[in-house]
Image (cartoon, rainbow, N blue to C red):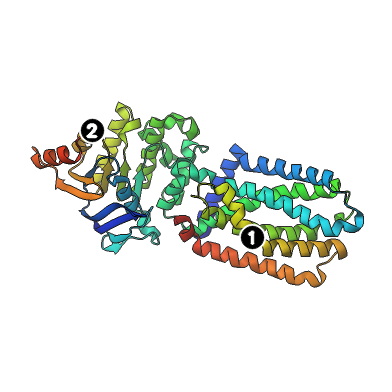
């Protein structure tokens, strides 16, 4: 899969949340999406997920222009938002069953159990999501995307709710996704952690792309951009 | 996955959630029954005025209880950004529309199964043999209400005062359905058959078919905007 973002812009009323954004993402890339609050990170993730439509510009998946009207393309995109996108009054297992059915994936009980076991929730499979902690909900989201296997996975600030083993679980899942040719775009304020995982960094500031490079060691250009655009940056 | 399979899956999910929360159904039941008692205290229906008054009172009760149900229709989708999860998935908007309209129809029919006989008992109506015709008209009207109501409920989903806005948008558009059901029901209660009011019944059918088709076709656009 190849994702091309061409002169993408999004305005909310008179406010431009994103302007003239160009990106080219190849299979297996893991991209850190960085920027201060209000830089346009979430807007970009929503545009890539088809949750909002661009004001101008286009997104292409393997040269096919992306629009919400193509369900086959939507089935290839995932959005891992910790503790979100789960029905509180369904059990963990029912949530997995519902979403795997919706995506036309294997939804037999042993497959769901295997995914729950992988994220350490097998014993809690029958519990309502409302009774799970935020960290457990995030683990359940990981199990969901483990089963749905999207080719482009958008990850929105995943570290806040996970404990140490949860972070290890998430990172090993994301590495697996990249290894099998998936593309990851991860928005986070935990800069050092996200950079250790990703092989490319993109910095947005005031809706514009201000930095886009593959990871290097040492990385003076990133350090310069980091101090310029993320003056109060994360850990 | 076909449109109907997706709709069935969503309907399964909504039914399961309702069975566990019982928010909508219980509220609708109690409100519907409460309205009947209020009507019963307020109006003393003489036997010669039954055909004239009963349809209007019944539909008033259905409109208010139905609006309560519609206000809760997308509650599960509002929690945890679940609407985004559905929009992100390969789900056809038409399937979401069908599932939501059917779910609301199920709730309303359950309420009507209790409310209509209770109305007969409270107002001491002796026309029990006319209940099947009354139910048929009510069902056609309820389909129209649910179909249009689901569309309007989705349109006002992101509005700030959606609970206030929904009836303001919905009720004027419901006038053809209300008029048709009341005229048909009145004729049934008066003569025991649809007689020359069959045109209203056709209008009801036409309304249901047009808005059901329109809903399936445009719901993707409605829910996105």
Helix, strand or loop at disc 2?
loop
Q: Residues within 10 Å of mark 1 (few under 14, many from 20)?
A: few
The residue that appears at 53% across and 62% down in the rendered structure is B216
Residue A212 or residue A181, whichever sits in front: A212
Residue B94 or residue B4, whichever sits in front: B94
Residue A108 visible in the picture = no
Disc 2 to disc 1, C-alpha distance: 54 Å
Tell me which corner region of the image, top left, top right, bottom left or bottom right, holds residue B80: top left
Task: Check disc 2 and report the residue beneath it.
Answer: A234
Task: Check disc 1 and report the residue beneath it.
Answer: B172
The residue that appears at 71% across and 70% down in the rendered structure is B202
Q: Residues within 10 Å of mark 2 (few under 14, many from 20)?
A: few
Residue A143 or residue B183, whichever sits in front: B183
Quarter of the figure with the C terminus of chain B: bottom left
Residue A193 visible in the picture = yes
Q: Answer with left or right where residue A170 lies relative to residue B156.
A: left
């Amino acid at each position: 899969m190849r994702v091309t973002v061409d002169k993408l812009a999004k305005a909310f009323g008179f406010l431009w949340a994103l302007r003239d954004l160009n990106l080219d993402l190849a299979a297996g890339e893991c991209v850190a999406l960085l920027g201060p609050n209000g830089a346009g990170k979430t807007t970009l993730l929503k545009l890539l997920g088809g949750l909002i439509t661009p004001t101008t510009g286009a997104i292409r998946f393997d040269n096919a222009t992306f629009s919400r009207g193509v369900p086959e393309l939507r089935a290839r995109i995932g959005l891992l938002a910790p503790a979100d996108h789960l029905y509180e009054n369904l059990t963990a297992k029912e949530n997995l069953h519902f979403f795997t059915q919706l995506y036309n994936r294997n939804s037999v009980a042993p497959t769901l159990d295997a995914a729950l076991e992988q994220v350490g929730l097998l014993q809690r499979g029958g519990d309502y999501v409302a009774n799970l902690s935020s960290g457990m909900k995030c683990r359940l989201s990981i199990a969901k995307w483990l089963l749905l296997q999207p080719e482009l996975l958008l990850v929105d600030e995943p570290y806040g709710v996970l404990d140490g083993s949860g972070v290890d679980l998430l990172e090993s899942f994301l590495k697996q996704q990249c290894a099998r040719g998936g593309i990851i775009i991860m928005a986070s304020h935990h800069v050092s952690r996200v950079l250790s995982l990703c092989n490319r960094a993109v910095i947005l500031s005031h809706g514009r792309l201000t930095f886009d490079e593959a990871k290097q060691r040492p990385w003076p250009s990133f350090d310069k951009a980091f101090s310029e655009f993320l003056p109060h940056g994360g850990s | 996955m076909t449109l109907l399979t997706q709709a069935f899956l969503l309907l399964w999910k909504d039914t399961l959630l309702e069975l566990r929360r019982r928010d909508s159904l219980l509220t609708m039941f109690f409100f519907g029954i409460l309205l009947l008692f209020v009507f019963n205290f307020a109006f003393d229906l003489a036997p010669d005025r039954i055909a004239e008054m009963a349809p209007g009172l019944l539909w008033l009760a259905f409109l208010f209880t139905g609006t309560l149900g519609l206000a809760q229709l997308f509650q599960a989708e509002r929690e945890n950004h679940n609407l985004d999860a559905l929009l992100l998935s390969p789900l056809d908007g038409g399937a979401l529309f069908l599932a939501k309209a059917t779910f609301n129809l199920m709730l309303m029919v359950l309420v009507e199964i209790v409310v209509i006989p209770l109305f007969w008992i409270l107002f001491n109506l002796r026309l029990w043999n006319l209940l099947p015709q009354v139910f048929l008209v009510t069902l056609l009207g309820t389909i129209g209400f649910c179909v249009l109501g689901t569309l309007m409920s989705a349109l006002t989903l992101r509005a700030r005062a959606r609970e206030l806005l929904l009836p303001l948008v919905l009720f004027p558009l419901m006038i053809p359905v209300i008029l048709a059901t009341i005229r048909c029901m009145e004729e049934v209660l008066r003569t025991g058959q649809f007689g020359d009011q069959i045109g209203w019944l056709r209008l009801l059918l036409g309304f249901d078919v047009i808005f059901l088709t329109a809903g399936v076709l445009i719901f993707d656009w409605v829910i996105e905007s």
